[in-house]
């Protein structure tokens, strides 16, 4: 199958109301353009340097999402154009995003990343830290940041009941917080687990290899 055929197949498996972020990390500009030409406008990258070179070489109507761990000192490079930062995992990072957005006369959309995986390799905040940050956002402490949702990554395990438990825990928290905060997106699900994530309530999925094929990190 071509990557465009992969893309159509993934699109057909996702309900209309679920946002698709095509995760293009490690893949070249030419491949991204093929998916763009097939109609995709939202792409996700996890490294600032790589994102910058792709941003410069691809159409300007692409909505770029940063989905990987972001160091505070690198926010300034992406602040002029980034649409959404899905991986906000500390108040320090949020404050820097707010500052850089203000410098560029912009508002940057953010999702707060919560650690739901039981394994300890993933970034993300605890529910308690997230509670505190949502309160500060509601008080208007970060006027150049638009909080729009939550992001979580499940454990990389075979055990579907564990993955389902992790997704469901985040969905419950999301529903509870949505009552008082402007949370629209619940970003859960990748190539290996997106049907399960959607059935657990995700409305935004981040899909890389199911569209672009396996990543080759040695290149
Ligand atoms: C790489 C990555 C994805 C996509 O992974 P696939 O398994 O290739 O779909 C999704 N979310 C995050 C945060 C990632 O780093």
Image (cartoon, rainbow, N blue to C red):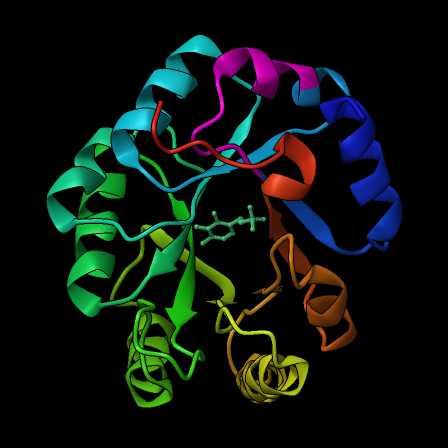
Q: Quadrant of residue 104?
A: top left
- Residue 70 visible in this rendered orientation of the protein: yes
Q: Give the residue drawn at x 55%, y 83%.
A: 166
Q: x, y percentage for residue 6?
A: 78, 33
Which segment is the magenta one? 23-34
Left or right: 87 with respect to 95?
right
Q: Quadrant of the N terminus?
A: top right
Q: x, y percentage for residue 26?
A: 43, 29
Q: Nearer the viewer, residue 202 or 134?
A: 202
Q: Judge whether 197 appears above or below 59 on screen.
A: below
Q: Nearer the viewer, residue 85 or 122?
A: 122
Q: Quadrant of residue 88?
A: bottom left
Left or right: 52 with respect to 168?
left
Magenta stretch containing residue 75, yes or no? Answer: no
Give the farthest residue toward the right.
12
Q: Nearer the viewer, residue 157 or 44?
A: 157
Q: x, y percentage for residue 120?
A: 30, 77
């Amino acid at each position: 199958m071509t990557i465009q055929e992969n893309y159509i197949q993934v699109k057909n498996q996702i309900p209309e109301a679920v946002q698709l972020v095509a995760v293009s990390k490690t893949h070249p500009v030419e491949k991204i353009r093929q998916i763009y030409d097939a109609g995709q406008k939202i792409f996700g990258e996890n490294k600032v340097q790589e994102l910058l070179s792709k941003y410069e070489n691809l159409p300007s109507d692409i909505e770029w999402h940063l989905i990987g761990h972001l160091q505070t000192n690198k926010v300034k490079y992406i602040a002029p154009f980034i649409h959404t930062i899905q991986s906000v995992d500390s108040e320090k990072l949020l404050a820097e995003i707010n500052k850089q957005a203000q410098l560029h006369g912009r508002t940057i959309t953010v999702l707060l990343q919560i650690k739901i995986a039981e394994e300890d390799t993933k970034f993300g905040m605890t529910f308690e830290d997230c509670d505190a940050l949502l309160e500060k956002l509601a008080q208007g402490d970060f006027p150049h940041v638009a909080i729009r949702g939550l992001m979580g990554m499940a454990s990389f395990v075979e055990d579907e009941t564990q993955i389902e438990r992790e997704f469901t825990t985040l969905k419950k928290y999301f529903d509870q917080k949505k009552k008082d905060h402007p949370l629209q997106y619940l970003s859960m699900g990748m190539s290996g687990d997106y049907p399960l994530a959607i059935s657990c309530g995700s409305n935004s999925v981040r899909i890389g290899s199911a569209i672009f094929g396996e990543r080759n990190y040695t290149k």
